[in-house]
Image (cartoon, helix red, strand yellow):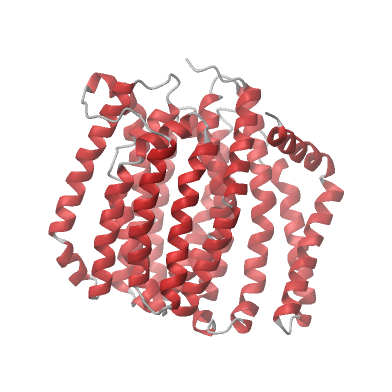
């Protein structure tokens, strides 16, 4: 059995987050810039086509490994070569089962959504990307299980660098939807080569059910959970693409993209490491308590002020940025999505905790509820409020995420409100400051000054009322990063 102590796991986790954030910081900035360029040069309808077609491919992705990859990460003992090869073989069989019918009926799918020829080619490129992605699962699992994020981040940097540069170059050249096609193919090839370069493994085909029988007890409920997430999110996008014009779908995609940007920049890096780290801490409740509370503190510390900034400054940005007036109809949806990320950011560490300790059926029950609620609320809200009803429904349902806290407390005694309370108050103070000073925002430089001042207000409040917590948390982070 692998020997992981609380100290080693904590330091590896901190180093992992630091590696993901620091080494991908420029890539993340490039991604933001690429998204910005796309929203300038692409029409809302083109953006909507990519949003819908991507969701169709994501729909396929959920059926590629029946949760065995996550089961390999959660497994207490180190997986054998036989387990790795059997998982790989089963995954490729499932990929073939999914891909072949999709290719056969691709023309009918394109006709159903009235997708143009360029959109159809994008669809085929995403299928290719889906196949290549499945071949990278096992080496990625090996690195995640070992908390080896220093190497894992290398292929991610390479593929995202190529992808975002391609988006910027070809969008600026006026390639329209074809921009995504070129970028997707380039990303797939570069990511595949880089992954196998940094993490080779004894690849091979094998199938012994006995070697993965135990993995199914975790993997199947886990994958059922993710499939429900698929029905809740991506399949809903597929439905929206049929009932709403692509321009309105583009508004929804724009709002969701920018509202969830804080989650992609901050929470994803923390959560990605939290699951394998918590899985290694199953035997130590005190350590698990610390891990949860620190995750809540750090995520809320970064997410809350960013959400306030998005909600407060987005109307001004649309006015000041050239060619951005076309996105003004998306501002209401942007605000609703942004507010819903607050609840997502503080509930996700808890669902990861439940999954890490093997309570995957509980998270499954939550996902069933959220899926049913989404499919009841969203169509009704679309009928009542149009495309803005999609984001409004998401915000309403996000409130129920707080029930995860109640269930998590049954398995571990920890504080939920203490790690986030001061960040909530500080964010509220920041918002009040922005509203008072908003009359002075008459130009883009004035907006930047007001944004910097509001962030300083937020930090000053926390320095005054959470000084010890900040010192301990960031002191440990800096010490872990510097340690060998």
For this orientation, the residue located farthest to the top is 1
Is residue 392 visible in the rendered image? The answer is no
Estimate the x, y position of residue 283 in percent, counting from the top left.
55, 19
Tell me the quadrant of the picture where the C terminus can be found.
top right
- From the viewer's perspective, is 58 left or right of 305? left
- Please name the residue shown 57% across and 38% down the image: 406
Q: On the image, which quarter does residue 126 sit in?
A: bottom left
- From the viewer's perspective, is 100 left or right of 227? left
Instruction: Say if 292 sits above or below 80 in the image.
Output: below
- Please name the residue shown 47% across and 62% down the image: 164
**How many discs mark residues in the rendered view?**
0
Estimate the x, y position of residue 212 in percent, counting from the top left.
29, 24
Q: Camera-side residue: 395 or 148?
A: 148
For this orientation, the residue located farthest to the right is 464
Q: Camera-side residue: 267 or 352?
A: 267
- Please name the residue shown 77% across and 82% down the image: 439
- Please name the residue shown 62% across and 77% down the image: 317
Estimate the x, y position of residue 413 in percent, counting from the top left.
64, 29
- From the viewer's perspective, is 255 left or right of 192? right
Q: Camera-side residue: 310 or 97?
A: 97
Q: Camera-side residue: 73 or 241?
A: 73
Estimate the x, y position of residue 403 in percent, counting from the top left.
54, 43
Instruction: Say if 420 sits above or below 73 in the image.
Output: below
Instruction: Say if 250 sits above or below 66 in the image.
Output: below
Is residue 130 visible in the rendered image? The answer is yes
């Amino acid at each position: 059995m692998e020997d992981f102590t609380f100290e080693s796991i904590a330091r590896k986790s901190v180093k992992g987050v630091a590696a993901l954030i620091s080494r991908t910081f420029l890539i993340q900035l490039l991604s933001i810039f690429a998204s910005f360029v796309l929203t300038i040069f692409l029409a809302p309808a083109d953006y909507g086509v990519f949003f819908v077609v991507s969701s169709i491919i994501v729909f396929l992705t959920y059926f590629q490994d029946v949760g065995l990859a996550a089961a390999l990460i959660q497994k207490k003992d180190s997986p054998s070569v036989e387990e790795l090869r059997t998982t790989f073989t089963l995954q490729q069989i499932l990929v073939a089962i999914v891909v072949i019918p999709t290719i056969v009926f691709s023309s009918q799918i394109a006709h159903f959504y009235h997708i143009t020829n360029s959109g159809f080619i994008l669809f085929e490129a995403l299928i290719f990307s889906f196949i290549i992605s499945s071949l990278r699962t096992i080496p990625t699992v090996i690195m995640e299980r070992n908390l080896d994020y220093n190497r894992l981040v290398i292929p991610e940097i390479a593929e995202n660098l190529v992808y975002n540069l391609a988006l910027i170059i070809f969008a600026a050249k006026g390639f329209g939807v074809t921009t995504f096609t070129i970028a997707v193919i380039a990303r797939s090839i570069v990511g595949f080569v880089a992954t196998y370069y940094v993490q080779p493994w004894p690849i091979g085909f094998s199938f012994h059910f006995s070697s993965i029988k135990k993995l199914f007890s975790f993997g199947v409920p886990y994958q059922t959970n993710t499939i429900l997430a698929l029905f809740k999110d991506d399949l809903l996008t597929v439905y929206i693409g049929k009932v709403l014009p692509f321009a309105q779908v583009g508004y929804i995609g724009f709002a969701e993209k920018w509202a969830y940007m804080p989650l992609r920049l901050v929470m994803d890096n923390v959560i990605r490491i939290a699951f394998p780290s918590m899985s290694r801490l199953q035997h130590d409740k005190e350590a698990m308590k610390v891990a949860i509370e620190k995750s809540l503190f750090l995520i809320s510390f970064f997410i809350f002020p960013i959400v306030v900034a998005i909600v407060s400054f987005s109307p001004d940005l649309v006015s000041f940025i050239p060619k951005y007036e076309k996105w003004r109809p998306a501002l209401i949806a942007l605000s609703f999505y942004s507010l819903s990320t607050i609840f997502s950011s503080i509930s996700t560490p808890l669902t990861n905790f439940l999954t890490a300790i093997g309570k995957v059926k509980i998270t499954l029950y939550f996902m069933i509820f959220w899926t049913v609620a989404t499919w009841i609320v969203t169509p009704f809200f679309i009928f009542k409020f149009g495309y803005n009803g999609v984001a409004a429904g998401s915000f309403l349902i996000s409130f129920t995420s707080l029930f995860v806290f109640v269930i998590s407390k049954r398995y571990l005694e920890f504080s939920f409100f203490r790690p986030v309370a001061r960040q909530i108050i500080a964010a509220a103070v920041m918002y009040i400051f922005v509203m008072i000073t908003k009359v002075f925002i008459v130009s883009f430089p004035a907006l930047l000054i007001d944004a910097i001042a509001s962030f300083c207000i937020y930090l000053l409040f926390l320095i005054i009322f959470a000084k010890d917590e900040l010192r301990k948390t960031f002191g440990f982070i800096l010490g872990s990063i510097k340690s060998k």
